Image: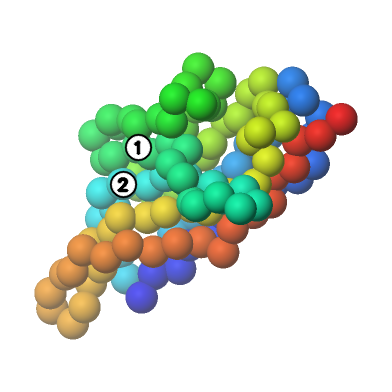
């Protein structure tokens, strides 16, 4: 089993910045991809940003140029730097981990989610 924990959410005014952190722990062999998804009231969970272990990134068009994702491969952590925040960025942000998990003497590729952290952008 793998535990995923995110933190760093809070309330800010439009134009301000926040930094979210995510860490994964457990019987991890290696993590392929870590990233962030978000959900606002009345919407489905949507992509924010991801990064694979080769540093390849994928950003939602709505955050590209404002948000930046980074990873520490050895520490199994990821950081999302959110700049120029807008009211439409408000929502619950979830860390997602695509990971090879050690089971007995084998490994399996599984996906885990954090519990979410609230980001509120309002004046």
- Quadrant in the rendering for residue 25: bottom left
- Residue depicted at x 62% and y 48%: 40
Q: Position of residue 31 (x, y in %)?
A: 29, 53
Q: Tell which residue pokes out farthest to the front in this image.
A: 42
- Quadrant in the rendering for residue 107: bottom left
From what the image shows, is residue 93 above or below residue 81?
Answer: below
Q: Count residues near mark 1 (Cα–Cα under 10 Å), then give few for <14, some for 14-19, many for 20+.
A: some
Label 2 to label 1: alpha-carbon separation: 6 Å
- Residue depicted at x 53% and y 36%: 80
Find out whether the residues at labels 2 and 1 contact each other: C-beta distance under 8 Å.
Answer: yes
Q: Tell which residue pokes out farthest to the right in this image.
A: 123
Q: Tell which residue pokes out farthest to the top in this image.
A: 65
Q: Is residue 63 left or right of residue 119?
A: left
From what the image shows, is residue 19 above or below residue 106?
Answer: above
Q: Position of residue 56 (x, y in %)?
A: 28, 30
Q: Is residue 70 visible?
A: no
Q: Which residue is mark 1?
A: 51
The N terminus - image quarter: bottom left
Whichever of labels 2 and 1 marks the residue nearer the N terminus, that label is 2
Q: Which residue is mark 2?
A: 33
Q: Is residue 46 visible?
A: yes
Q: Position of residue 33 (x, y in %)?
A: 31, 46
Q: Count residues near mark 2 (Cα–Cα under 10 Å), then give few for <14, some for 14-19, many for 20+.
A: many
Secondary structure beneath label 2: strand
Secondary structure beneath label 1: strand
Q: Position of residue 29 (x, y in %)?
A: 24, 61
């Amino acid at each position: 089993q793998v535990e995923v924990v995110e933190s760093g959410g809070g309330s800010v005014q439009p134009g301000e910045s926040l930094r979210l952190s995510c860490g994964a722990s457990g019987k991890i062999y290696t993590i392929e991809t870590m990233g962030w998804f978000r959900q606002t009231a009345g919407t489905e969970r949507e992509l924010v940003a991801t990064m694979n272990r080769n540093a390849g990134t994928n950003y939602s068009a709505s955050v590209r140029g404002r948000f930046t994702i980074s990873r520490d491969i050895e520490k199994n952590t990821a950081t999302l730097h959110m700049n120029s925040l807008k009211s439409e960025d408000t929502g619950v942000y979830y860390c997602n981990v695509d990971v090879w998990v050690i089971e007995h003497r084998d490994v399996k590729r599984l996906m885990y989610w954090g519990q979410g952290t609230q980001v509120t952008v309002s004046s």
